[in-house]
Image (spheres, rainbow, N blue to C red):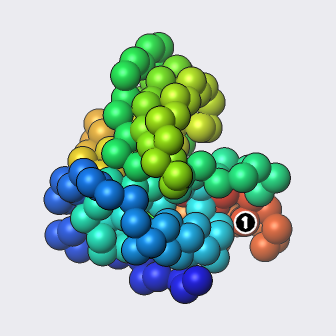
């Protein structure tokens, strides 16, 4: 496995729609595992392939360190309902967080790494992460959902306490 370079705004690849994966071969599996290692290294919640410079529709999500990672290939949102304001960050927008609106509940269909069809019915952080990562695959950043630039905030030293808390908050908000 390898840690991949995470693309940072304004890298144009982050604005490009990723392509559907036609065959889940060894190169896709290697990419998936490398993406997961990269996500863990960055203490993030989710990572989409665009963010490591690959325009393929695959993302990995891990909302809690106790959980197994969820790999989604060619994901589609089939249903979304409700609305809630959330604080969000992104590994491609380091040092910033912003408040945006996300769905309360999302249903997603996708393929897993074995090529099997999976359905995810999600609320909370998982729902937020699914919307965030599927946005990435469509070339959309959470910044595009901000009502104004004033709703984007720099993470300052005052908002950080000790390292442990910092990692927890990063885990909660960056994907
Ligand atoms: Ni992101």
Q: Image quadrant for the N terminus?
A: bottom right
Instruction: Name the spot of residue 75 as percent of width and height, x first.
Output: 38, 40
Instruction: Name the spot of residue 25 as percent of width and height, x first.
Output: 40, 66
Q: Is residue 106 above or below residue 62?
A: above
Residue under the image location 52 percent in, 34 percent down: 118
Q: Residue most toward the top? A: 82
Left or right? Give the position of 50 relative to 31.
Answer: left
Q: Is residue 86 visible?
A: no
Left or right? Give the position of 166 relative to 2.
Answer: right
Count of all numbered marks drawn on residues in the image:
1
Residue designated by label 1:
167
Q: Is residue 67 above or below residue 157?
A: above
Residue 24: image quadrant is bottom left
Residue 49: image quadrant is bottom left
In front: 162, or 73? Answer: 73
**Would you call the spot at circle 1 few (<14 residues within 10 Å), some (14-19), or many (20 or more)?**
some
Q: Is residue 1 above or below residue 167?
A: below
Q: Is residue 164 visible?
A: yes
Residue under the image location 66 percent in, 48 percent down: 63
Residue 18: image quadrant is bottom left
Q: Secondary structure at mark 1?
A: helix
């Amino acid at each position: 496995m390898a840690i991949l370079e995470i693309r940072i705004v304004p890298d144009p690849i982050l604005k490009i729609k990723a392509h559907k994966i036609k065959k889940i071969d060894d190169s896709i599996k290697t990419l998936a595992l490398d993406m997961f290692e990269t996500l863990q290294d960055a203490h993030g919640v989710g990572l989409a392939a665009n963010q490591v410079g690959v325009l393929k529709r695959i993302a990995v999500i891990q909302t809690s360190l106790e959980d197994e990672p969820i790999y989604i290939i060619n994901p589609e949102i089939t249903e979304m309902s409700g609305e809630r304001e959330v604080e969000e960050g992104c590994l491609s927008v380091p040092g910033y967080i912003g408040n945006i609106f996300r769905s309360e509940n999302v249903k997603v269909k996708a393929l897993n790494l074995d090529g099997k069809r999976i359905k995810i019915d999600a609320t909370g952080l998982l729902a937020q992460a699914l919307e965030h990562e599927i946005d990435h695959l469509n070339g959309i950043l959470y910044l595009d959902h901000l009502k104004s630039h004033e709703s984007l905030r720099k993470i300052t030293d005052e908002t950080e306490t000790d390292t442990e808390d910092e990692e927890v908050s990063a885990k909660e908000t960056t994907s």
